[in-house]
Amino acid sequence: MADELTPETPEEEQPKKTHKQRKNGLYPGVSDELAESMRTGWADTELHGLEPIAQAAHTAARRAALSARFPGERLVVPAGRLKTRSNDTEYPFRASTEYAYLTGDQTENGVLVLEPTGETGHTATVYLLPRSNRENGEFWLSGQGELWVGRRHSLAEAEQLLGIPAKDVRELAEALTEAEGPVRAVRGHDSGIESALTDKVTKERDEELRVYLSEARAVKDEFEIGELQKAVDSTVRGFEDVVKVLDKAEATSERYIEGTFFLRARVEGNDIGYGSICAAGPHACTLHWVRNDGDVRSGDLLLLDAGVETHSLYTADVTRTLPINGTYTDIQRKIYDAVYESQEAGIAAVKPGAKFRDFHDASQHVLAEKLVEWGLLEGPVERVLELGLQRRWTLHGTGHMLGMDVHDCAAARTEAYVDGTLEPGMCLTVEPGLYFQADDLTVPEEYRGIGVRIEDDILVTEDGNRNLSAGLPRTSVEVEAWMARLKG
Ligand code: GLY
Ligand code: MN
Ligand code: MN
């Protein structure tokens, strides 16, 4: 019967009964005859001669750099585990950025371990769940069995694909508990691995590993730049999709826009890289408006901030602020054109050797000038900037690093990021905005409820920069012409 089907499986890995099995009448009773039937009669589907994944050579170089930074120490980088959404359903899984960056793999429960080979050098092993056991019924009786969730790669297949030796992850916790010598782990993804390491790691040392992995991602290699361009290209198509259905959004809500963009993200990529901001009318003034349940009205603006994440987990981060009926009003155009001018100044300041802060300063300067020119702030501009008075309406920083995380390299030290210098291969957003809240009594009424942001993804090149998202128009006139063409 059912209990006899789990003889050698460690307790935490024993097949769990799922609601699906209960529903299908498979629980609680499984006859010996059925159990025997399910054990046998399956073809050998092992795959041979697999080609390594496209990023395998790059991940090897990344692991070599990591190894050189932490000689003589065991390094543990988990992919993470499924997170419960409710009862026995889980959120879609997304591997930790650190794990995917170092292995190219995205399997839940995976763990990369770099084992020191002496004073220098490491051997890498990726610990994974192997194919489901058919002998003990795991493959059909466990909620995570392959019959329920789909075929996994065997360890031998994973080795060929990733170019890294693979072992059974169910043996890892014990091996880590018994292991001697210094260890560092990336925290926050896998509580099982963290418990196995409790007595061996410290927060401070683990933080150094996290900081290193954040800073290591600042300069993108050729593969990563290609993926970022793919993410942006899909995003451009997603924006076009949205423009084509604005009438349907007017008849429903911002959710129609969210769903339309999501369709493109799921069909061409892995997912959206962050919650899409589909902000119509005054919602544009709420910086992270992701409820997306508001009305879409002709005459208002739509601020759409969205990005497709590729199958290799690189994301775009693009914003356009569009007139819902295809034509900007005078006040909308005035504000839009000011933000455009500010963005132009910011993009021009992105080049190798420039300080990271330069593009922010250049953008803010233009916005402060406009606010003084419009009589919303009293000059001189330098005083406004010194006191930061423009920030009532500019609200946020002008950009951030972009990569596998939308706010990439977030654990980098200030001196390596915000106070750092731009280098070829870095990719960042330039995204100034002006936001006049609907209840802001310090501005004339015609400004209230208007929010404009323009955001592009800019690659630092040897001699300046390249706008990866130039496929979307940016000037107000070009935006109108583009919308007219698409709505045709
Ligand atoms: N989408 C969030 C941001 O622009 O930073
Ligand atoms: Mn954005
Ligand atoms: Mn951004």
Image (cartoon, rainbow, N blue to C red):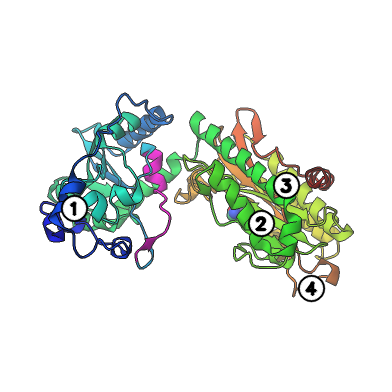
Q: Residue at x 35, y 50 (%)?
A: 149
Q: Position of residue 171 (x, y in %)?
A: 17, 47
Q: Amino acid at mark 2?
A: Ile
Q: Tell us which disc is closer to us: 1 or 2.
A: 1
Asked if one can make out residue 354 in the rendered structure from this viewpoint, the answer is no
Identify the residue position indicated by label 1 in the image: 34
* Mark nearer the N terminus (1 vs 2): 1
How far is mark 4 from mark 1, CA to CA?
Answer: 75 Å
**Position above or below: 432 against 216:** below
- Quadrant (top left/top right/bottom left/bottom right) for the N terminus: bottom left
Residues at badges 4 and 3 in contact (C-beta under 8 Å)?
A: no
Q: Which residues are magenta?
A: 88-102
* Direction from residue 105 to residue 44 in the image, left or right: left
Q: What label does residue 343 carry, if any?
A: 3
Measured from the top left, where is residue 255 in percent x and y? 64, 62
Q: Is mark 1 within 8 Å of ligand 1?
A: no
Q: Which residue position is annotated with label 4?
A: 442
Q: Residues within 10 Å of mark 1 (few under 14, many from 20)?
A: few
Q: CA distance from mark 3 to mark 1?
A: 67 Å
Is residue 166 left or right of 94 when viewed as pictured? Answer: left
Q: Nearer the viewer, mark 4 or mark 1?
A: 1
Mark toward the viewer: 2 or 3: 2
Helix, strand or loop at mark 1? helix
Q: Secondary structure at mark 3?
A: helix
Image quarter in which the C terminus is found: top right
Mark 2 neighbour class, 10 Å CA radius: few under 14, some 14 to 19, many 20 or more: many
Residue toward you, 347 or 178: 178
Question: Of the residues under marks 4 and 2, which one precedes in the sequence?
Answer: 2
Residue matched to label 2: 257
> Which-is-in-front pick, marks 3 and 1?
1
| Cα distance between the residues tagged 4 and 2 | 32 Å
